[in-house]
Amino acid sequence: MDDRTQAIHAGLQAIVGSDQIFTGVATDRWSRDWTGQFEGMPLAVVRPGTCEEVAAILRLAGQYHVPVVPIAGNTGLNGGAYGAGSILVSI
C-alpha cells in the first residue's frame, strides 16, 4: 500500500472508526454489479453513521482527488455503482 492510500485509510479511520471501513478482499461484495459486467476494486468501502461523517469523507476525498461513489444494495444493472479506485459510501 502506498503512502497516499495509507493516508486516506488513516483519515477514514479517524472519521468513522476502523470497524466501519472495508478494504482489500473485504470489499468483494461491492466490487462488481449484479450483471458481472462491471468489476473493480474500490480503494475502500465506508459506512458513515452521520451527515457530518459523510461531509468529512467528501472533504478527505477532495483533498486527495479520489472519486466517491454512493452505493446501497449494489443492485444496479448499468454500472452506476462501479467504483474501481474510489471510496464507496454505503449507508
Image (cartoon, rainbow, N blue to C red):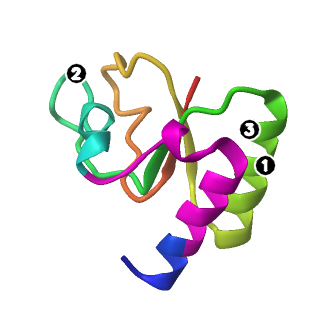
The residue that label 3 is drawn on is 54
- Looking at the picture, does residue 60 appear above or below residue 63? above
Could you tell me the amino acid type at mark 3?
Val
Foreground label between 1 and 2: 1
Residue 56, x across and y down, in percent: 78, 49
Q: Earlier in the sequence, mark 2 or mark 3?
A: 2
Q: Quadrant of residue 7?
A: bottom right
Up the image or down, 7 lies above or below 82; here it is below
User: Which residue is depicted at the point 31% across and 42% down?
Assistant: 27
- Category of crowding for the residue at label 2, using alpha-carbon neighbours closer than 10 angstroms: few (below 14), some (14–19), many (at least 20): some
Magenta-colored span: 7-24
Query: What residue sits right under mark 2 in the picture?
Result: 34
Identity, as a three-letter code, of the amino acid under mark 1: Ala
Q: Main secondary structure of the magenta part?
A: helix
Q: Are marks 1 and 3 in contact (CB under 8 Å)?
A: yes
Kindly indicate the quadrant of the structure image that contains residue 55: top right
Q: In the orientation shown, which residue stands out farthest toward the bottom? A: 3
Amino acid type indicated by mark 2 = Trp
In the rendered image, the quadrant that contains the N terminus is: bottom left
Q: Residues within 10 Å of mark 1 (few under 14, many from 20)?
A: some
**Mark seen at residue 56:** 1
48 displayed left or right of 33: right
Left/right of residue 51 with respect to residue 5 in the rendered view? right
- Callout 1 secondary element: helix
Mark 3: few, some, or many residues within 10 Å (few <14, many ≥20)? some
